[in-house]
Each structure stands twice: as structure tokens, then as C-alpha cells.
Image: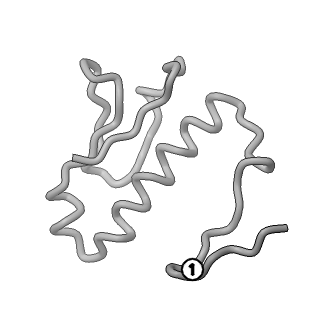
Amino acid sequence: MFYSYTYPGLDGFADQKVEPAEARFDKDLGEFLLPYDAVRTSDDPDATLMAFLQSTYEAAANLGDWDRDALECALGKPKVPRAIH
């Protein structure tokens, strides 16, 4: 199971639309869940998991009014260190 949550919890987080369709919010745990099998059996497991991670991050960042310009950077390339500026 993959999961995503905020701490402290954000009002409205449970009501956000996230991807993929198999993801759901578990009220008892207070977090979004994505079954491992949904990723494993996907045509593109990497993209399926990334959609979950990106959509739950965006839901939290938008609700939490995070300074996304200060926090975010472009995706890197596997096994290539990013330059430090």
C-alpha cells in the first residue's frame, strides 16, 4: 500500500480529487491510500505511482497555501546529481 498524508491534517484534504482512480481517502487512518496491486498491474507503474504522489502533493500544497515557488524544482534524471547553486 502506498500512502500520503499531511501533518497537521488540513481541512478539506480528504475531499480532494487525486489520481489514479484506485486511490481513496481512509478516514480511520487520515490518509490517502493507493493499493500496491493498482500500481503493479498498471500499464505504466512508474507513471501510476507518480500520478498519486504528485496529485496528493498538489492537494496538500494548495490547501496549505505552501510557497510552491520556493519548494519546487524540475524533476531530475535518475542517477544524475543535480547541480548546487
Tell me the quarter of the picture where residue 84 sits.
bottom right
State the count of labels.
1
Q: Residue at x 30, y 51 (%)?
A: 21
Q: Which residue ends up furthest to the right in the rendered image?
A: 85
Residue 1: horizontal and vertical position, in percent?
21, 46
Residue 54: horizontal and vertical position, in percent?
50, 54
The structure's colour scheme is one colour
Q: Residue at x 18, y 66 (%)?
A: 40
- Kind of element beneath mark 1: loop
Mark 1, Cα crowd under 10 Å, few <14 / some 14-19 / many 20+, is few
In the rendered image, the vertical position of residue 32 relative to residue 35, given as above or below: above
Residue type at mark 1: give it. Answer: Lys
Left-right relation of 81 to 4: right
Tell me the quarter of the picture where residue 48 sits.
bottom left
Q: Residue at x 68, y 68 (%)?
A: 74
Left-right relation of 27 to 81: left
In the rendered image, the vertical position of residue 70 relative to residue 81, given as above or below: above
Left-right relation of 56 to 40: right
In this rendered view, identify the residue nearer to me: 74 or 23.
74
Q: Residue at x 19, y 49 (%)?
A: 35
Left-right relation of 65 to 60: right
* Residue wearing tag 1: 77
Name the image quarter holding the C terminus: bottom right
In the rendered image, the vertical position of residue 1 relative to residue 12, given as above or below: below
Residue 80: horizontal and vertical position, in percent?
59, 82
In this rendered view, identify the residue nearer to me: 67 or 77.
77
